[in-house]
Image: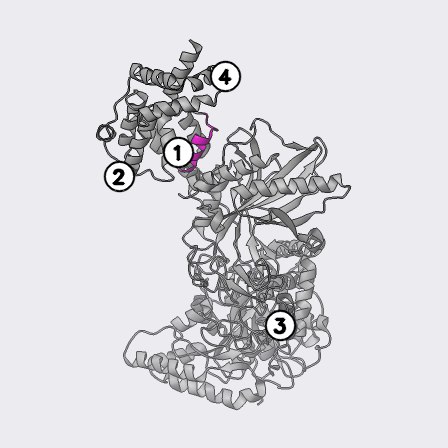
Amino acid sequence: MTMTAEVPEAAAHDVDDDVDIVNGYELVVGLEVHVELATNTKMFSSSPNHFGDEPNTNIDPVTLGLPGALPVLNKAAVEHAIRIGLALNCEVQPSIFHRKNYFYPDLPKAYQISQYDIPMNIDGFLMLPDGKRIGIERAHMEEDTGKSTHVGGTGGRIHGSEHSLLDFNRCGVPLVEIVSRPDIRTSEQARMYVSELHDILIAIGASDAKMEEGSMRVDANVSVRKPGEPFGTRCEIKNVNSIRSVGRAIDYEMRRQIDLIEAGDTVIQQTRHWNETDGRTHTLRTKEDADDYRYFPEPDLVPIVPSAEWIEEIRESIPVLPAARRAHLSMVTGQPASGEAISVVTSRGQDEYVLAVAHLGGDAGRALIYVKEAFADGPDVPAADLAVLTRLEVDGKLSATQAKTVLAELVANNGGDAEAIAAAKGFEAMDSSALESVVDEAISADPAAWEKYRNGDQKAVGALVGRVMKATKGQADGKAVTAILQSRRDA
Amino acid sequence: MSIPATPSTSDFAGVIALAEQIRNGDRTAVDVVEEHLARIDAGDPELHAFNLVTAESARAAAAIVDDQIAAGNPVGVLAGVPVALKDNLCTHGVETTCSSKILQGWKPPYSATVVDRLAAAGAITIGKTNLDEFAMGSSTENSAFGPTRNPHDPSRVPGGSSGGSAAAVAAGFAPFALGSDTGGSIRQPAALCGVVGVKPTYGTVSRYGLIAFASSLDQIGPFTHSVADAAVVLEAIGGHDPMDSTSLPQPFPPVSSVLDRGVEGLRIGRITDLPTGADDDVNGRLDAAFAAMEAAGATIVDVQVPAFTFGLTAYYIVAPAEASSNLSRFDGVRYGLRVDAPSTGEMMAASRAAGFGDEVKRRIMLGTYALSAGYYDAYYGKAQRIRTLIAQDFAKAYAQVDVLMTPTAPSEAFHFGDKGDNPLSMYLCDLYTIASNLAGHPGISVPYGVGDEGLPIGVQVLAPALGEPVMFQVAAELERLASK
């Protein structure tokens, strides 16, 4: 897993605060998330579904929409789509495909096979880690388009370009579009929603959900209103390519709409393009230019009517989802389930490892912190080795600083005997009376700093701790030193 | 060239006879192919049944069949028998045009399932036949490459859209041909050319590799000199194909084995509320067919199929709607005609404007309109409800009878240009064939004598879905009665 960059940072504001009110306006957001399914082959043909290959190598008559070619639905794609629906608490119903008709060079049939008014999954919800429930209107199947690269002109847009290159490798890759209800009220909730959805998709194996590769793509429908009033006119924001951008784009768009209204203008319903570089959204098209997609039932396919037995089989194959895993980890470590450490570790799929450390007699709380800080993925250190290290630390045989040094050795060597490493480094547990005398020496050596500290200057503590660290060659436990200083001051 | 009207029998050897002669070593496949190529050379410059004659590959394939037979290897049921393919069936590496400028020069990188199955059975593709552009028409006058002429009277149309295939069989250019039938495009030209033409039950013959006109209506079927030949061909090309999701998961219903059963005890329905409009001589032949059937032991039962008459209107919503979508892929981007223009959108528009003929454009516009926001329910939605109604009315009729008999086409073959300026009168050519496409049911046209002008007239036998066995049983009897 390589999603560490997209794990949400700790909430910048109180997450219990359910709405952002800016200038008296409330944000209303619904998200449409497209995810590419982790199938071996495409939605309607046997071409490989594989990212990053040489352009136009994963193609066939069906992918290219050659005359006479017909689609045949990939059962594995249906299974993944049902799995997504079940993981999002949806009702799975018999469904059909429609054709969505429009001309575009990377859409070779000039229609996209999609689900329209009878989608597969309806009426679900997703619980955010903070307990907020976001409704899921639908999660339906559709096929991906090819990819256009516009050469010449500015910004890779078709307008003003000299020519375009087409790659049909992505064309026909199975997608599920997950449409939330407009239940999101803060940009932080939007970020949490995307992050949580990402983790769920990974957990159930339905998608690799890599926003940077486009296998998970987010469009945000954003509007503002005065609390209690009807929904305002919405704008759809496209090209939001990271979880960080989800927040930035929504914040910008909220501000833009509020400014418009405050200036006496009205928000016009339109599709807007998020520009990561200038941090703004730009008009892509207004509702008036929108295509009439002339939807009608796809006559080349038959309805999808999954049997109740098959749905149950899929339901039983769904593993424990991230929310339950966080709750479990929280119980074992004593850390808050919605806290950063548990989020990060669960999101990276390292929770099992932390539980293993605890099971082997290690300290779960320390293991959680070690794993979060020292292992972006993996870990490659045997859980038993980490268990030994956490015990040494919580038993007071190693200071936090010493433990960190040993941890670095374990990481570098993919494991090892923590006790032996500590001994080799000459680490000895410094008993508290020894540490107290070092602290007293530091106080005597810098009476001015001591005076300042006693008079409430917290900054002065740094000078004193620094002296202790110097005297102990960095092996003293900083927290213990501060505690002794406090007890001396308060004595 | 002009051949005498021989509506119910043929001067030419049929599929079963040829296959037997070749298998038995009485004739070589090369000899059979050369004979047909010679007839094509002599006759096709006038008739224009073919867009392309694949003489060299046919000779090569025939030589291989002869080698197999000489070596005593087992060969397929159609080994060495030439076939003409409607030019909307994809043939690997062989130009497939739909008789449209927009596809001229396009060589598919794959073959239609039916083409593969014919090859597996040993049949030899002798050429690609002319059609109304994208199968839209009833006279083959809408071909971008010029019309096909009726072998019985070259001043007249062969019917359409599979006019090239019908004419090729009638003229002896091939003992059988494949066509596609969306609203009557096999049965109507079969009737006008005096050959047998079958539209099987929707889903019994794979559509994979058939360039779609209207996906929910299109079916591939054969043109032959006899009902028995048609049965053999359908058994070779039909049956489940995993490449077509609408293909039924079962073999083609057994039809060759039922042909001798006669009609004793069968109930044949006469639709009393059939839409009027057929010429008197056509109705006369139908009446004669009913009388002959009754004499042969069938019971004639009057039934009503009230929704039959709405078929034409529903068809001209559903078929253009699907066509408008199916034909959108011809955009100049990847294959076929491209007319360069400053922007992508203008290039697409210019390519389509130059590449499609008037009838195709007319139907694309009709269909686009019918699917547009705000009109969908009034047109497409209502047309689909009519389809349901037609199926229900057919079901009531089939509760009383085994098959229905109707005219195939309202008239004998007409002259070129007779209907060219009036799309509606052309559309009426399919008045009696369209309902079975909308219901997904099978239909067969069997030559049954000649009309006032001495040209062939066909009688159509209709059956419920998968009712091919009883349909063929009756058709075979009709064929026997016609030759009496």
Judge the density around disc 2: few (<14), some (14-19), many (≥20) Cα neighbours within 10 Å.
few
Q: Residue at x 66, y 66 (%)?
A: B364
Question: Which residue is the site of mark 1?
Answer: A372
Q: Is residue A323 left or right of residue A263?
A: left
Which of discs 3 and 4 lies nearer the camera? The answer is 4
> Could you confirm whether marks 3 and 2 are on the same chain?
no
**Magenta stretch in the rendered image:** A336-348
Q: Is B80 or A235 nearer to us in this picture?
A: A235
Q: Is B64 or B295 nearer to us in this picture?
A: B64
Question: Which residue is the site of mark 2?
Answer: A413
The secondary structure type at the circle numbered 1 is helix
Position in image of residue B441 (x %, y %): 56, 61
Disc 3 to disc 2, how far (Cα)? Answer: 65 Å
Residue A477 can be seen in this image:
no
Disc 2 to disc 4, how far (Cα)? Answer: 45 Å
Question: Which residue is the site of mark 3?
Answer: B351
Which of discs 1 and 2 lies nearer the camera? The answer is 2
Task: Identify residue type, mark 2.
Answer: Asn
Quadrant in the picture for the N terminus of chain A: top left
